[in-house]
Image: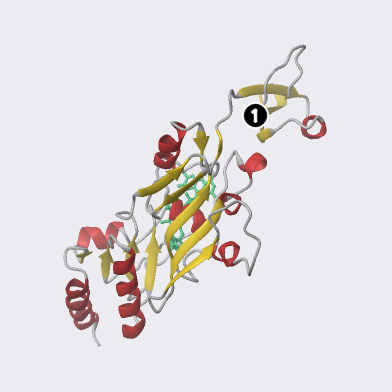
Amino acid sequence: MSRQGMTGSVADELVRLLPGRVSMAEADLLSYSQDQGPVTDRALPLAVVWPETIQEVQAVLKWASGSMVPVVCRGAGSGVSGGAHATLGCIVLSLERMNAILAIRPEDEVAVVEPGVINADLNSAVAAHGLMFAPDPASYRWSTIGGNVATNAGGLRCAKYGVTRDSVLALDVVLADGTLIHTGHSTFKGVAGYDLTALLIGSEGTLGIVVGITVRLRYLPESVNTIAAFFPDVRSAAAGVLAVARARVHRHLTSRQHLHHPPRTHTRLTGSSRFVGNGVLR
Ligand SMILES: Cc1cc2nc3c(=O)[nH]c(=O)nc-3n(C[C@H](O)[C@H](O)[C@H](O)COP(=O)(O)OP(=O)(O)OC[C@H]3O[C@@H](n4cnc5c(N)ncnc54)[C@H](O)[C@@H]3O)c2cc1C
């Protein structure tokens, strides 16, 4: 079938399936054709679809499987590896409208969210309870929790709290044929059965579309201290970092920069530890 013909039938079927949720406008096709990764061979999608419910995601995937139309899933498009780039003849399935925080259970230290919730929005919502969602990719102000899960994102806090996989307890996932599955547990201890949640985290949409996430929350630090230490060279900076680790200080991340004028290494350590006197960190 010609692209024109295919485009027409895809539009008709998708619009019938999800009225008001499909666009074939050139501007939408262009802006949803790539994420933040470099584009070597741009392809425009046939359509962009914005489902608003799990049932709508199921309907799209069931239809796409039956019609042999590839689906490229998309959160906020902040990925830098081209995972959300459109491919020839695909539709882009954007989860950005599924952005509700469904539950916050402070006593259990968990929250349940739709995939399009922005990382920073979840953190603002749970901060009122003295809690946080620890994974903090540098894109936390605009990347989605679904995208964080799909890429197993990590950020500065991962040295202390682990990556996204360490903060996800359960998932709702729509498979290619439209089947909805539930994996994991809503409690910290959930050891029975195969760990399908861990398998799905980091799978970048290749195994299914994440449509619901139960996340584990952590305590907000009482205070945050930042120390800048200066070393004459990389070797002594590395020794300094190891000394901090041996002191069992709960650190977030160490980063180093070479400062050429004057030549020395600057090591930055941010932690939630508390000074307890005499410069000792706990
Ligand atoms: C300035 C900047 C800083 C960044 N910093 C970091 C960082 O510190 N650490 C880090 O790990 N990454 C970082 N990234 C990369 C990116 O932000 C993360 O990978 C982020 O988690 C992607 O989220 P997203 O919502 O933008 O997903 P997208 O970019 O839209 O998608 C990413 C991948 O996940 C898939 N996907 C998205 N949503 C779903 C879903 N609901 N179900 C199934 N698959 C899905 C997509 O198909 C794609 O393969 C950064 C990017 C930028 C531009």
SS under mark 1: strand
Give the answer, above or below, for where 167 lies relative to 87. Answer: above
Q: Which residue extends farthest top?
A: 278
Residue 79 picture location, percent across and down: 46, 54
Q: Which residue extends farthest bottom?
A: 1
Q: Taking 60 as reference, is 194 left or right?
A: right
Question: Could you tell me which residue is drawn at 23 percent across and 84 percent down?
Answer: 2
Residue 149 picture location, percent across and down: 50, 56
Give the answer, above or below, for where 42 lies relative to 36. Answer: below
The answer to whether any part of residue 98 appears in the image is yes
Q: How many marks?
A: 1
Residue 282 picture location, percent across and down: 73, 24
Quadrant hosting residue 179: bottom left
Give the answer, above or below, for where 71 lies relative to 76. Answer: below
Give the answer, above or below, for where 219 lies relative to 214. Answer: above
Residue 280 picture location, percent across and down: 76, 18
The answer to whether any part of residue 37 appears in the image is no
Question: Could you tell me which residue is drawn at 25 percent across and 88 percent down?
Answer: 1
Residue type beneath disc 1: Gly
Residue topped by disc 1: 271
Q: Taking 243 as reference, is 122 left or right?
A: left
Q: Taking 222 as reference, is 54 left or right?
A: left
Q: Nearer the viewer, residue 173 or 155?
A: 173
Q: Is mark 1 within 8 Å of ligand 1?
A: no
Instruction: State the scheme by which the image is colored.
Output: secondary structure
What is the crowding at mark 1: few (fewer than 14 residues within 10 Å), some, or many (at least 20)?
A: many
Question: Could you tell me which residue is drawn at 20 percent across and 78 percent down?
Answer: 13
Q: Taking 43 as reference, is 208 left or right?
A: right
